[in-house]
Image (cartoon, rainbow, N blue to C red):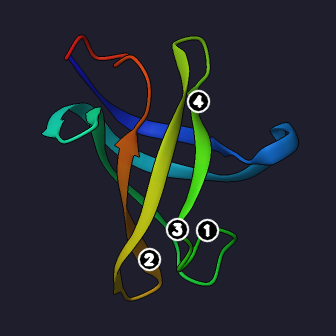
Amino acid sequence: MSYQGYVRVIGEGGNILDVAEASLGAIDHPGHRWGGTMTVWSGGALDGKTMMVDLEVPGSFRAPALIIPGPVSGRRRQLSVLGGGDSPFGG
């Protein structure tokens, strides 16, 4: 199972930091069983930041994740996502 679509990126205190396009699923990475990528606007709240956030797909799941900045293409930046806790994707 995997998910492609929009996620809410939630910071400390429950504040929504951004809404991002995401491609998430089960991964094989030391210490992480799920993850993927997100795309955000360059210059936005998440641009260039490494941080722990909660990712939420309303009505489906909310889970902690580490986001790590990646390459910029035009006005968009790709972020790597390494999920924490149990995988919402059965992996």
User: Which secondary structure, mark 4?
Assistant: strand
Q: In this rendering, does residue 5 appear at all?
A: yes
Q: Which residue is mark 3?
A: 50
User: Which secondary structure, mark 3?
Assistant: loop
Tell me which amino acid carries mark 4: Glu
Lower sequence index among marks 4 and 3:
3
Q: CA distance from mark 3 to mark 1?
A: 8 Å
Q: CA distance from mark 4 to mark 3?
A: 18 Å
Q: Quadrant of residue 7?
A: top right
Q: Give the residue displayed 61% in from the left and 21% down from the top.
A: 58
Q: Give the residue displayed 19% in from the left and 42% down from the top.
A: 30
Of tags 3 and 2, which is closer to the observer? 3
Query: Relative to the observer, which residue lies in front, 57 or 63?
Result: 63
Q: Which residue is mark 1?
A: 46
**Image marks 3 and 1: residues in contact by CB distance under 8 Å:** no
Lower sequence index among marks 2 and 4:
4
Q: Which residue is mark 2?
A: 76
**Image marks 4 and 3: residues in contact by CB distance under 8 Å:** no
Query: Relative to the observer, which residue lies in front, 38 or 35?
Result: 35
Q: Where residue 25 appears, x then y in whole percent?
A: 24, 30
Lower sequence index among marks 2 and 1:
1
Which class describes the residues within 10 Å of circle 4: few (<14), some (14-19), or many (20+)? Answer: some
Q: Quadrant of the N terminus?
A: top left
Lower sequence index among marks 4 and 1:
1
Of tags 2 and 4, which is closer to the observer? 4
Q: CA distance from mark 4 to mark 1?
A: 15 Å
Q: Give the residue displayed 87% in from the left and 41% down from the top.
A: 13
Q: Which residue is mark 4?
A: 56
Tell me which amino acid carries mark 3: Thr
